[in-house]
Image (cartoon, grey):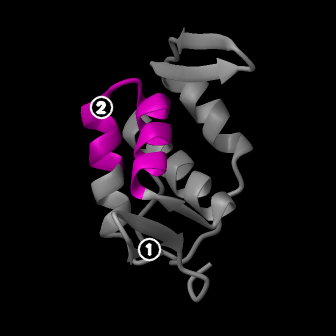
């Protein structure tokens, strides 16, 4: 399930999309993901968590940097719930591709250019 919340101008938007594994696979195939490591293990089909992880990484990579609250809001919108959004935020925090810097009151998540 994918939930999109926000607004278009003054109009609030709250859209929920139900997607099965085949839908997630098609969505994942549309994303261009750079391979940073070559693994000898055979590739397994992407599950929903893997697809969300790739989308979260792409979101931050394309933005370059986002404040913690802004990133969390987008991740919550992507996952449809707060706890799943927080799990992705923690996973990004510990990713070697992401640098977390002190941005005053809130942390700043920055895609690491050295690894991009």
Magenta span has 84?
yes
Q: Position of residue 116 (x, y in %)?
A: 62, 78
Q: Point out the tag, 1 or 2, that comes first from the N-terminus.
A: 1
| Mark number displayed over residue 40 | 1
What secondary structure is found at the residue carrying circle 2?
A: helix
Which of 33 and 40 lies nearest the eye of the viewer?
33
In the depicted structure, whether residue 111 falls above or below residue 91: below
Residue 44 or residue 10, whichever sits in front: 10
In which quarter of the view is residue 80 placed?
Answer: top left
- Give the class, few, some or many, for how many residues have Cα within 10 Å of label 2's Cα (few <14, many ≥20): some
Q: Secondary structure at mark 1?
A: loop
Residue drawn at (69%, 48%) of the image: 31
| Disc 1/disc 2 C-alpha distance (Å) | 35 Å
Q: Which residues are magenta?
A: 68-88
For this view, does 104 lie left or right of residue 57? Answer: left
* Tag 1–tag 2 contact (CB < 8 Å): no
Residue closer to the observer: 86 or 18: 86
Q: Position of residue 36 (x, y in %)?
A: 55, 77
Magenta stretch containing residue 80, yes or no? yes
Residue drawn at (58%, 23%) of the image: 6
Dominant secondary structure of the magenta stretch? helix
Instruction: Relative to 59, say whether 39 is above or below.
Output: below
Instruction: Tell me the quarter of the image containing the N terminus.
Output: top left
The answer to whether one can see residue 81 in this image is yes
Crowding near pointer 1: few (<14 within 10 Å), some, many (20+)? Answer: few
The percent position of residue 17, horizontal first and vertical second, equals 55, 13
Quick check: 85 above or below 116? above
Going 27% across and 46% down the picture, which residue do you hit?
A: 87
Where is mark 2, residue-wise? Answer: 82
């Amino acid at each position: 399930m994918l939930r999109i919340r926000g607004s278009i101008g003054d109009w609030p938007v709250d859209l929920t999309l139900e997607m099965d594994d085949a839908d997630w696979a098609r969505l994942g195939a549309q994303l261009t993901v750079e391979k940073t490591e070559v693994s000898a293990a055979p590739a397994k089909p992407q599950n929903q968590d893997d697809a969300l992880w790739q989308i979260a990484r792409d979101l931050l990579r394309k933005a370059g940097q986002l404040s913690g609250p802004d990133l969390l809001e987008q991740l919550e919108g992507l996952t449809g719930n707060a706890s799943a959004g927080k799990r992705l935020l923690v996973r990004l925090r510990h990713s070697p591709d992401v640098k977390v810097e002190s941005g005053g009151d809130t942390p700043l998540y920055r895609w690491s250019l050295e690894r991009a």
